[in-house]
Image: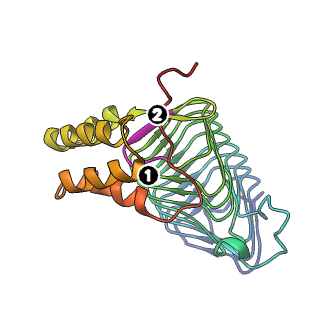
Amino acid sequence: MSNIHSTAVVALGATVDPSAEIGPYCVVGAQVTLGPRVKLHSHVAVAGITSIGADTQVFPFASLGHPPQDLKYRGESSRLEIGERNQIREHVTMNPGTEGGGMLTRVGNDCLFMASAHVAHDCILGDHVIFANNATLAGHITVGDFAFLGGLCAVHQFVRIGRHAMIGGMSGVETDVIPYGTVMGNRAHLSGLNLVGLKRRGFDRDAIHALRNAYRLLFAPEGTMAERLEEVAEQFTGQDLVMEIVDFIRADSSRSICQPKPENAD
């Protein structure tokens, strides 16, 4: 236990890998599990049934696993699972799940949470997700792999954010965001595809070209969304990225799909 600072408080029952580091003035609860090479820099508070995966770093004043900000929570033994190789910066907060949402909040691997980001109860996040400063999720939200959430954005409960989507800074997101889409504004509207992100991650030019054509057709002013969706599905069969968007829209959701801003809107 030489990697635990003398001022840290680690409750009996906590599972701490011998290679983990716990810095000054950290507080670790009795049901916490810290994996190999996890580092709590200082003044970190980890509570509840919380597990933190290998090589994750947590910076000062982060609060992980404390009771959800939900008036319906009654102390049920819900969990917070944080994956491997994440960076959780200063003042980040993450809450465990609730009985009404599956009892689990899960964060994937290789994510970055900049200062003061918030992950609420029952959220499920994929891998390589980035939250800029003060990006916040309400409860019951799913976020796909490689999504980027801009600074000061806020996402409404039960919203789905697709893979490789980009949320603009200071956006208020009330509706589902398609994979590979970019949204911005208050309230957020779909402003196109995340072409910069697609190019940076090495997507094939033909695949991106198909996405652009499908996007134009899917959000054209003619016809209904259902009609355009079927047309896209027929025309782009075999285009995996396009069909991912089709499947995303077809899936059951309590939210509608975020749409482009009408041309005559202010």
Does the magenta-highlighted stretch encompass residue 180?
yes
User: Residue 162's mark?
Assistant: 1
Could you tell me the amino acid type at mark 2? Pro
Residue under the image location 54 percent in, 61 percent down: 253
| SS state under label 2 | loop
10 vs 255, nearest the viewer: 255
Residue 191 left/right relative to 13: left
Q: Which residue is mark 2?
A: 260
* Snapshot quadrant of residue 9: bottom right
For residue 146, say whether it is visible: no
Where, quadrant-wise, is the N terminus in this rendering?
Answer: bottom right
* Front of the two marks 1 and 2: 2
- Where residue 144 appears, x then y in whole percent? 44, 55
Q: Position of residue 58 (x, y in %)?
A: 60, 52
Residue drawn at x 36%, y 44% is 180
Q: Sequence-wise, which precedes: disc 1 or disc 2? A: 1
Q: Which residues are magenta?
A: 177-183
From the viewer's perspective, is residue 14 above or below residue 258?
below
- Front residue (pair 217, 17): 217
Question: Label 1 neighbourhood size at 10 Å, few (<14), some (14-19), many (20+)?
Answer: many
Residue drawn at 68 percent across, 69 percent down: 97
- Relative to 252, does residue 13 appear above or below in the rendering? below
Q: Position of residue 211 (x, y in %)?
A: 25, 42
Amino acid type assigned to the residue bearing label 1 in the image: Gly
In the current view of this chain or complex, which residue is farthest to the front? 223
Q: Residues within 10 Å of mark 2 (few under 14, many from 20)?
A: some
